[in-house]
Amino acid sequence: MSRLDEVLGTAILKGKKALGKEASEVLRLPLDLLRVRGQPRRRFENLEALAESIREKGVLQPLLVRRVGEAYEVVAGERRLRAAAMAGLKEVPARVLELSDKEARLFALVENLQREDLNPYEETVGVLALLSEDLGRPVEEVVALLHRMQNERRGKATQNVLGSPEARRVEEVFKALGRMNWESFVQARLPLLSLPEDLRAALEEGAIPYTAALELKKVKDESLRKALLEEVRAGLSLRELKARVRGVLRKEKAPRPWPKEVAAKLARLDLEALPPERRARVEELLAELERVLGK
């Protein structure tokens, strides 16, 4: 039994049993009876090549499904299903699993997360969905929990979050996945959730690495960010990008020059002509300005 099996329990074991010696009978199911649920995997690359292979050899590995009413829900094998439809097949081989709703969701999430072609954004969404399902809490609450854990680890809070059963469960799931620990996930992956739309799209397309997306996120000027994004697409290295971004941030933080129109107004200012309340406020501000400039 693997660490992942041990942590997530019967959902994974039932899926493996369906593929092993005790596998259930393979059925031929019509495509119009098959349904898919939302998955962290949003891209399905090389579908045309898989479809061509299916035209020649058929679907070699049965899909894993479960019965839902009069239809079947695909637990594993959505890519094969899509390719089979492209190839013009009317039915596909499938094995039916006896899974609860939660077991099906867990199995589907883990099966997708174990694929190598998930991009970092999809993987981030998938890990959060897995934690949400496992903890029985909405994704937003899982994100908040992770941030509280990070704050406590950094000494910014003393709420004993790290000693809670939920925090220990989070650590167990990350160890079982074997990809990264929860701290690196919070630091490097959660920021991907707040990427501007253009960066998120480029990341999901696989056009840029997530490290470049995080650097580009620092640039608030949209037109400048898009220009830098195109350079990254064209091959700008991460090192060169970081240097460009540092330059942009220095310019953004530089103090603005004194507006000429304000200086001109001060030169024409006639305090005696102002109403008493405005005159008192202007004099107060001028006195403050003199104190600051006199330092």
Image (cartoon, rainbow, N blue to C red):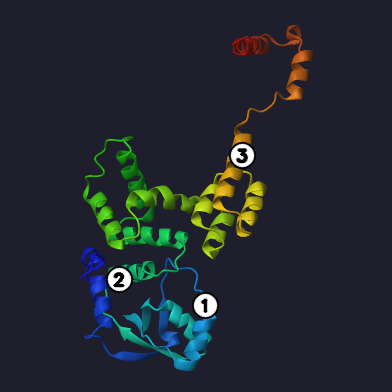
Q: Is residue 32 above or below residue 113?
A: below
**Sequence-wise, which precedes: disc 1 or disc 3?**
1
User: Can you give x and y, in whole percent of width and height, for residue 23 in the image?
Assistant: 25, 85
- Camera-near label (1 vs 3) is 3
Q: CA distance from mark 1 to mark 2?
A: 30 Å
Q: Residue placed at 23% from the left, 51% from the top?
A: 168
Residue indicated by mark 1: 46
Q: Is residue 20 left or right of residue 75?
A: left
Q: Of all residues shown, which one is farthest toward the top?
A: 272
| Disc on the earlier residue, 1 or 2 | 1
Q: How many C-alpha atoms fall within 10 Å of the one at disc 2: few (<14), some, or many (≥20)?
A: few
Q: Is residue 212 left or right of residue 275?
A: left
Question: Circle 1 sits in a helix, a strand or a loop, which is it?
Answer: loop
Among the 4 quarters of the image, the one containing residue 151: top left
Q: Which residue is mark 3?
A: 247
Report how far apart the C-alphas of labels 2 and 3 lie in the structure: 51 Å
Disc 2 designates what residue? 101
Give the Cα separation between the discs numbered 1 and 3. Answer: 40 Å
